[in-house]
Each structure stands twice: as structure tokens, then as C-alpha cells.
Image (cartoon, grey):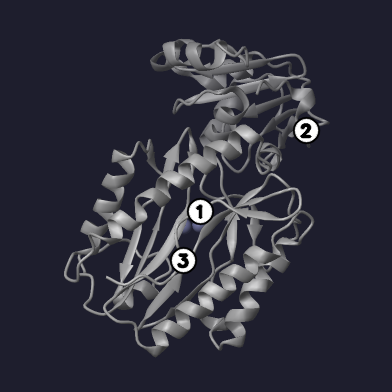
Amino acid sequence: MAAPMGEQRGSGRLDALLVSHLPNVRYLCGFTGSNGLLLLTASNATLFTDGRYREQAAQEVTAIGAARVVIPARGDLWKAAAARLRPSARVGIEGNHVTLAQRQRFLQHWAGSAARLRNASGGIEAQRAVKDPTEVAAIRRAVELASSVFLPTVAQLRPGMPETEAAGRLEFALRQAGGEGLSFDTIVAAGPRSALVHGSPSHAPLPQRGFVVMDYGVILGGYVSDMTRTVHAGRPDARARAVYATVLEAQAAAVAAVRPGAACAAVDRAARKIITKAGWGRQFPHSTGHGVGLEIHEAPRIAATASDTLVAGQVITIEPGVYIPGWGGVRIEDVVLVTAHGAEVLTPSTKEMLSF
Ligand code: ZN
Ligand code: ZN
């Protein structure tokens, strides 16, 4: 995916772009190390990294001819990039990801002035929002791996098991199945704690009766998965069944609204309408979904306030939930591909309410 400047969307008035956000660096030149700065100009691409990555950068970047690799003395990447830029150049930096210290170091060593620096944040992210078939295949594999450990892990759950142990069993299974890492800190939240939207696993035991929200993801081929299932300890009562059925219906309605050209806000509305009609609108405090890819939260946002429309090739989550303080909560989340004419749910796991 070599990318000289001229091809970068939204950077038409720039002479150079300094890409420092590592997922963007990886996307553009293939480098997966933890320290890298990619300089793009109209004619070429240069990756600056440090000596630890000499071999790796040669393998990942030089091999596909995506960029020249430079390893500056003393590892000062920003200084090295600054030395290569004309003072008259219009230089874009990723303002959302550059620290004040990095910006100062760059300006210290560049003959140009701060007035010629532009915030070019979001341009690469906009390209990344639409996945090519190779990326879709990678996400699909990650999603399928994560799904494959769901039922075997649920079969190990017992009342009294700490949430931390349940999370650990899930994470071990993901690693055992070949996961490169976790997409984010696993959420296992049980009983009344399932009403916490982002409940980190605690020492609280899984209850005799009540919901257990499990939200987790795995990285495979650099791409992430993201899924949530809510299971029930013991026999669900009428209220538990009603909340679960509502969230499931809302999830299906949002998935049904996904197609190219659909407003992201309309997809959010499709889920929210059903939850609101059931009387729990105020208990659904987050947006309906988000893009996934090299990162766990990418464009587009599937939210009431979003102004984007969906494009074929985007990969998003659909994850409505209802959270009742002191009682419990339900969230159901799938990864969904926007296809040429509609949507394909990539997550194969059952959405029936399972009990243990
Ligand atoms: Zn999730
Ligand atoms: Zn999510």
C-alpha cells in the first residue's frame, strides 16, 4: 500500500505529510513496530525508525517497496524528518496524535516556521474507513476466531466464579486459538454490575441468577474483532426476558438499516426507536456502533449525532444495550460489513439468550 503524497486525500495543499499515528503508518507502509514516523512527499515515502527495528523494517517495508527506511543517529525521528524538509514546504502533521513535545522538537530542527504547519488529522483515517477485500478477509478471520471461543467459554461458567476468572478463560482461549493479542481490555460484568456499560472484570462472583455481559475482541493479522454477548445465570425472569428481547430486536433493526447510502444516524435511530418504545430509551446511553479495522474504534461512528452516510466496504459494529442501575444490563454486538446492496453480519455466534 505504498502511498506518495499525491494520492493522499485531503492533503492537496500540502508538500509533505508527517504520519506519526502508528496504525496509519502501518496502513500506508506495512511497518508494525512501536516507534516510527513516515514522511510522505509528492515523490517518495521515508520511514524513520530506531535501531531496534532495523531488521523488522527491512522485512516489512523495504520488501514491498513502500518506503525508504532511515535509522537516524540517536533515534531522533522528528529531528531527522525536519532536516529533510525545505523551509518553504507546507507540512501536514496529525494534530490529534502529535504531542506538544514532538511538535516543538520538529520546529526546533526545521528551518521553516510554525505558520507553515497544518493539522492534517483524519485524512488517512477517512481512507481506512473503507476496507479493501484483503482487509475484510482479515477482519472476518479475527471475528470468526473470537466467535469460536464463545460457546466453549460459556460452558465453563459457574455461579461463584469471579468475573476476572471468566475473563481470563476467555482470553486464554483466544490466545490458544491463535490470537495475536486482545483488541481491548475484556469486559465481563455480572449481576448488577452488568448495568455498567464498560464494566472491567472485578473479583465479584458470577451470580446464581442474573445477566453476564461479555464484550471482547482479538487481533489477527493486525485487524481487530469486537463482539458482545450477554448470557444469563439461572432461569431468567419475565423482566430479564423482556429486556433481552428488546435489545435483540433493536440490534436486528439496526442491522436491517445498514446499506450503502444509509445515514449513520438513521442506523442508530433504528435501534433507539425500539428501545425507546419499550420504555428504556434513557437506559441506552451510548451510540449504536463504530467502525473497526486496525483499531477498535474507527470511522464511521454510528450515532445520533453522526453526519456520515455508509459506504460499501465499511466494517462497523452494531451494539445497542439497555442498562438498569442496581439490576443489570444487556448488550448484543456483531461486526457488520456494508456490502454493495446491504449488509453482511460477520459474527456467526448465536444471539439466543443462553443460560448456565
Ligand atoms: Zn465491544
Ligand atoms: Zn464495540
Q: Residue at x 30, y 52 (%)?
A: 170
The residue carrying mark 3 is 351
**Residue 15 spot, x, y in % from top left:** 78, 23
Residue bearing mark 2 = 11
**Circle on res. 347:** 1
Q: How many marks?
A: 3
User: Is mark 2 in CB contact (under 8 Å) with mark 3?
Assistant: no
Under tag 1, what secondary structure? loop
Tell which residue pokes out farthest to the right in this image.
13
Place of residue 355 in the rendered image (x, y in percent of width and height, measured from the top left): 31, 72
Q: Are marks 2 and 1 in contact (CB under 8 Å)?
A: no
The answer to which quarter of the image holds residue 63 is: top right
State the separation of the CA atoms marked 2 and 1.
Answer: 36 Å
Residue 349 relative to residue 269: left or right? left
Q: Quadrant of residue 219?
A: top left
Tell me the kind of residue under disc 3: Lys
From the viewer's perspective, is 61 left or right of 112?
left
Which residue does the image show at 36% across and 55% down from the upper left?
Answer: 150
Disc 1 crowd rating (10 Å Cα; few below 14, some 14-19, many 20+) is many
Q: Amino acid at mark 1?
A: Thr
Q: Give the CA distance from mark 2 to mark 3.
A: 43 Å
Looking at the image, is mark 2 or mark 1 earlier in the sequence? 2
Q: Residues within 10 Å of mark 3 (few under 14, many from 20)?
A: some
Say which quadrant the C terminus sits in: bottom left
Spatial CA span between label 3 and label 1 = 10 Å
Q: Secondary structure at mark 3?
A: loop
